[in-house]
Amino acid sequence: MIGILIDHKLVRFQQSIEFTFSFVFDTLGVPYNFISSLSELQSQDILFIYSLLEPAKQEMSELASNRIVFFVQAETDLLSPGNLSKKEIEELIKEIKLHTIIPVITENSFEHPLITYKTDGYFWGKFNFDIIGNILFHLSRYEESIPQAKDVFGRVSDASLSLFSYTKVPIVNNLLWMLDSFLKDAVSSFPKSFLIKKEFWPGGEGFAYSISHNVDSLRKWTGCELLKSLIANFYLLIILKWGNLIKQLKETSMYLLTNYEVYWNFSEILSFLDEFGVKATFFIAAEEEENLREFKYLLDDPELAEELGNIIEKQNEIALLTGIDHGDDKGDAFSKNRLERAINKKIKGVRNSKWKTGKTVCKDNNELEVLYSSNSSMIEQSGFRDGVAFPFRYHFLDEV
């Protein structure tokens, strides 16, 4: 068990600090508990101290006697989104060399991310930067709280991100890997402590990948689309694009002769997933007929209901897909409830159809009481906008 002791002087950041510690240790699969005094620790527990000031040597000696202790010194500007300007953030960037270069934001200069002092019966590990504040920086979309130009969705452009040159790697994942490695090394070198840890993945696999599908359209061929196709085919004929023309004619003919919809391909996708023994998440919209905007299908379609049943039967996940012209969170909450009633299961995740989500929409997603939001995406290129390589739940302080 890990006991987390937070400096009482950080009480105004308590919500953010506890959220971040919970994210860290829930993700690592490590049991933990927030404590208010050392008397709550068991003899084999590992102590994490998060404080404004480093303890004096005598106090360090007493705290780390017969125990593993990690100390992280808080840098409060990281706990207050918007406190640092873009220029200040860029000036504070330091690089850590792991298996790749990882940037952290800190006032400190250091050679190694962690310093350890250990002897028989004594272990003190000090982080040379605020790893908790740095993880929160990403989970809170910190830079969207800084006054600067944003698009209509409330997002800062890719090139304007302070860590833009590092977005090819998931920064938070690497910080978690580093922390996990430090924990393992500490326990292996200190026989008086032990840590029960869940595997990252069910069978103890070394890595995992996810497959997801946005079900934003189900029917390609309507009367209007057939007319458009006729005009498009004539144009392809004029410019001698024979390959594209043949493909279009084949699709149109198949629909007219067999009623086969190229977009209605659930069975093909499920067969593919079965072939490789993997599961997927299907993001489904749940708008009412009178409110149909972006998605031109209805949840109460009997054929769709059958397909959703097949998806669940094969142990795939169904999550909520919301529209690009996002209205208010009440509308999305209503859609979530409709989808839950339709599949008779609790919805755990949400995604906006085009990932065009700024801070406002992400905050609304949190109000849906889902476990994760799959809305983190670069705008103009591939990469990890929020530094995380898996869906997660954003953290935003309530507006005062």
Image: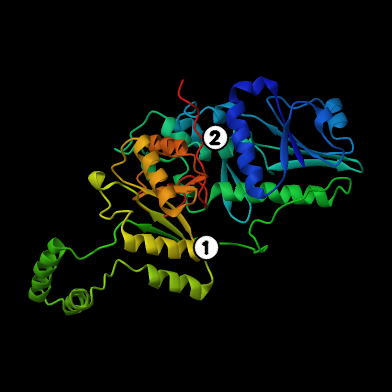
Q: Residues within 10 Å of mark 1 (few under 14, many from 20)?
A: few
Does residue 221 appear to the left or right of 231 in the view shown?
right
Which residue was labeled with disc 1? 315
Position of 225 with respect to 91 (left or right) is left
Residue 6: name its quadrant: top right
x, y percent for residue 266: 38, 67
Give me the C-alpha separation between circle 2 and circle 1.
46 Å
Compared with 53, 301 (above or below) is below
- In the rendered image, the vertical position of residue 2 relative to residue 270, given as above or below: above
Q: Give the SS element for disc 1.
A: loop
Disc 1 residue type (three-letter): Gln
**Residue drawn at (37%, 40%), measured in percent from left and top?**
334
- Asked which colour scheme the image uses, the reply is rainbow
Q: From the viewer's perspective, is 314 left or right of 119?
A: left
Observer-side mark, 2 or 1, equals 1
Question: Residue at label 2?
Answer: 92
User: Which residue is drawn at the image coordinates 42% and 41% (left, top)?
Assistant: 161
Q: Position of residue 178 (x, y in %)?
A: 66, 49
Numbered marks: total: 2
**Residue 382 percent location from the top left of the image:** 41, 55
**Depth check, front residue: 42 or 270:** 270
Between 75 and 228, the one lying in front of the other is 228
Q: Is residue 197 visible?
A: yes
Considering the numbered disc 2 on the image, is that residue within a helix, a strand or a loop? helix
Q: Amino acid at mark 2?
A: Leu
Lateral position of residue 346 relative to residue 7, left or right: left
- Relative to 279, does residue 274 appear above or below in the rendering? below
